[in-house]
Image: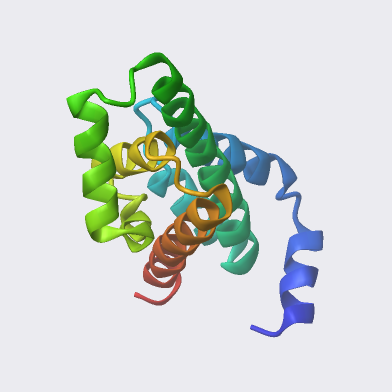
């Protein structure tokens, strides 16, 4: 679909409320709140007939939600002594697989742990945000393709 057609489709229907809900739902799903963002995302993609804007909105919400978990992990390290065995194990895990492990930050439950560990291990924020965004965007693009073309 051409860029102008996407803009026309978005203008021709009021998609703002569903996109706001999608953003908030995606944000919450990436925190400790037990939600999944796939169903609201799929509904917005199906109803709008486009994939780009929903992918951007859901990725932004989900990545910002992950940033809160990253921040909690980073804050927890100031409360838990750095020499704690749990902290040392978390840091070793992330050192072993490195930042590319964040490509899996979208995986239910396990992804949240990876994100918190990234914060606890003091991974640089830009590195964290980059890998996390790529992983989450890839997941939403694949889901959008499944909704529109499968």
Say if 140 sits above or below 25 in the image: below
Residue 148 screen position, x and y as percent: 45, 71
Number of marks drawn:
0
Q: Residue at x 25, y 59 (%)?
A: 97
The N terminus appears in which quarter of the rendering? bottom right
Residue 70 screen position, x and y as percent: 47, 36
Say if 71 sits above or below 59 in the image: above
Say if 41 sits above or below 72 in the image: below
Q: Residue at x 70, y 85 (%)?
A: 2
Q: From the viewer's side, name the closer residue of 107 and 50.
A: 107
Q: From the viewer's side, name the closer residue of 118 and 33.
A: 118
Residue 107 screen position, x and y as percent: 29, 49
Q: Residue furthest front?
A: 83
Q: From the viewer's side, name the closer residue of 45 and 24.
A: 24
Say if 148 sits above or below 108 in the image: below
Residue 28 screen position, x and y as percent: 49, 31
Answer yes or no: is residue 50 visible. Answer: no
Q: Please give left or right for residue 89 compared with residue 27 in the image.
A: left
Quadrant of the image occupied by residue 13: bottom right
Q: Please give left or right for residue 31 compared with residue 68 in the image.
A: left
Q: From the viewer's side, name the closer residue of 111 and 59.
A: 111
**Colour pattern:** rainbow
The C terminus appears in which quarter of the rendering? bottom left
Q: Residue at x 55, y 47 (%)?
A: 125
Q: Please give left or right for residue 103 compared with residue 140 in the image.
A: left
């Amino acid at each position: 679909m051409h860029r102008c057609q996407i803009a026309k489709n978005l203008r021709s229907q009021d998609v703002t409320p569903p996109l706001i809900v999608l953003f908030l739902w995606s944000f919450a799903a990436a925190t400790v709140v037990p939600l999944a963002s796939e169903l609201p995302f799929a509904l917005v993609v199906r109803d709008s007939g486009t994939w780009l804007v929903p992918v951007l909105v859901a990725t932004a919400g989900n990545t910002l939600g992950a940033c809160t978990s990253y921040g909690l992990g980073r804050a927890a390290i100031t409360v838990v002594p750095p020499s704690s065995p749990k902290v040392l194990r978390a840091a070793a895990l992330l050192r072993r697989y490195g930042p590319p492990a964040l490509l899996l930050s979208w995986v239910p439950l396990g992804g949240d742990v990876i994100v918190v560990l990234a914060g606890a291990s003091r991974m640089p924020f830009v590195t964290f945000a980059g890998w996390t965004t790529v992983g989450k965007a890839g997941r939403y693009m694949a889901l959008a393709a499944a909704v529109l073309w499968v």
